[in-house]
Structure formats: structure tokens, C-alpha cells
Image: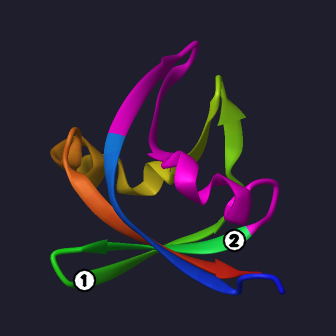
Amino acid sequence: MEIQQLLIPKVTVSKMRKKNGHIYYVYIPQSYTEYIQYKKWNIIAVLNGKEIPLGPRSPFKHGNNLIVTLPLAYKDLWESLLGKEIDLIFLRI
């Protein structure tokens, strides 16, 4: 049976430098890796009780971990949340 939705609580917002700017992302805890890897999900961030749709995303490997990039359209929001925890809802597409 395949999981259709999943809540991943308390993931930390981080920033990584790239050649042409920055990306914002969250690491997926290893205990969730087997459920979500290599699949496309519609992701919703939950911040202080508010839901922010992040759209379709595919987690990918970064070293030994999976990460999910966060949309740059919310750059100011991610800057204010660097190092803070958010919850993510993954809905199977």
C-alpha cells in the first residue's frame, strides 16, 4: 500500500549558496526517507497554523539525506524563518 499523504513535523529551514544565488530547503528526517523518496508530492508548509501551498516538488538526494527545495517566490519568508522549524504536509500527486 502506498502512502497518499504524510505530515513531517519540525523540519528546519536552511539556505545554501549556489553559483547564481541561493536556494532555501529543508532536510527530510531519515525515518521518512523510505516513504517519500523519488516520488512527486504536492507540498504544503504549515506556519503558526497557516497553510502555505508550495506546489509540486520532488525530494532529491543531497549527500546521504533527502532535501526539498522551497520556492523562491517566498524568499523573504524563508529568510525570516532560517534556522526555525516548520511542518510540511506531503500530498501524493
The image shows residue 34 at horizontal and vertical percentages of 72, 57
* Residue type at tag 1: Lys
Residue at x 55% of width, y 46% of height: 30
Residue at x 35% of width, y 36% of height: 14
The image shows residue 53 at horizontal and vertical percentages of 47, 77
Give the camera-side residue of 69 and 76.
69
The tag on residue 50 is 1
Q: Is residue 62 above or below residue 29?
A: above
Task: Give the colouring mode of the picture.
Answer: rainbow
Residue at x 33% of width, y 45% of height: 13
The verdict on residue 36 being magenta is yes
The verdict on residue 91 being magenta is no
Please, what secondary structure does the residue beneath circle 2 have? Answer: strand
Q: Give the CA distance from mark 2 to mark 1.
A: 19 Å
Dot 2: within a 10 Å radius of its alpha carbon, few (fewer than 14), some, or many (20 or more) residues? many
Answer left or right for 52 relative to 35.
left
Q: Is residue 46 above or below residue 73?
A: below
Range covered by the magenta-colored residues: 14-40
Answer left or right for 43 relative to 14.
right
The tag on residue 41 is 2
Answer left or right for 39 relative to 62.
right
